[in-house]
Amino acid sequence: MLSRLQPRLIVVLLLIALGASCRDTPPDVPAPEPWGTSSRSVAPRCSDAIVDIDEPPDRVDQTISDLMAPQPTLKGMADAADAIVVGSIVGERFHLSPECFPSTLVTIALDHVIKDHPRVGAPGERLVVWRFGGKRREGDIVVREEDVGFPSFKVGERFLLLLSWNANLERLYAGLAYNTLKVDGPILKPVGRESSSLIESGRDKELSVFAAELRALIARR
């Protein structure tokens, strides 16, 4: 009888030993990561740099950055603007913030200064303004972020621009479609989908005529 029970007893003793070994060895559980450092929630980071990207974009992403309503009257818009200029686009560079948001630095050759500002030079000089969106590299491709209904400026185009001063960036801002009229020959044309008193008052007018109207409104206090 003892000889028949001995193999079973050995198996039972082995199972007990293995069970004790499993209880004594804690599971291999990774330590929790500090708050805000999880690899699953790390925000993208980019170098804070201004770059030149000459290649055409492989993809265009539509964004919305214009959430402010314009002044209801043309005089209100002219008074609210920090500067009003007419000029041609001669270059662009791209700024990528540390959070990977692109913006465009647009260089304008000034033709006329309708409303002056300390940072605006005389006609014939150049002015760098900025607007949201622009080109950035995403791996092996070039992506352009562009405002819905307000296409990016192109070199050679000419515009009448109502500009606003951004104290944080210390630059004049040119990113509002309703503050922009394209100069097509001698005639003004809207460039975006939005409407404003500037767009409706300047649409299809000669630049010289509308510029005189703006100067008269600015002079009237």
Image (spheres, rainbow, N blue to C red):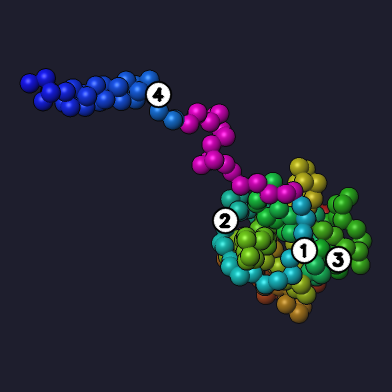
Looking at the image, tell me whether mark 3 or mark 4 is earlier in sequence order.
Answer: 4
The mark that comes first in sequence, 3 or 1, is 1
Q: Is residue 109 visible?
A: yes
Label ID, residue 64: 2
Residue 220: image x %, image y %? 80, 53
Q: Where's residue 88, x and y in %?
A: 80, 70
* Tag 1 and tag 2, C-beta contact below 8 Å: no
Residue 214 visible here: no
Amino acid type shown at disc 1: Asp
Q: Residue at x 11, y 25 (%)?
A: 4
Residue at 56%, 33% (x, y): give it: 36
Magenta residues, start to end: 30-48
Q: Image quadrant for the N terminus?
A: top left
Residue topped by disc 1: 52
Which circle marks residue 25 in the picture? 4
Q: What amino acid is found at the position of numbered circle 4 in the picture? A: Thr
| Residue under label 3 | 110
| Marks 1 and 4, how far apart at CA | 58 Å
Say what secondary structure mark 1 lies in.
Answer: loop
Question: Is residue 81 part of the magenta span, yes or no?
Answer: no
**Does residue 32 show up magenta in the picture?**
yes
Q: Picture quarter containing residue 202?
A: bottom right
Comes first in the chain, label 4 or label 2 = 4
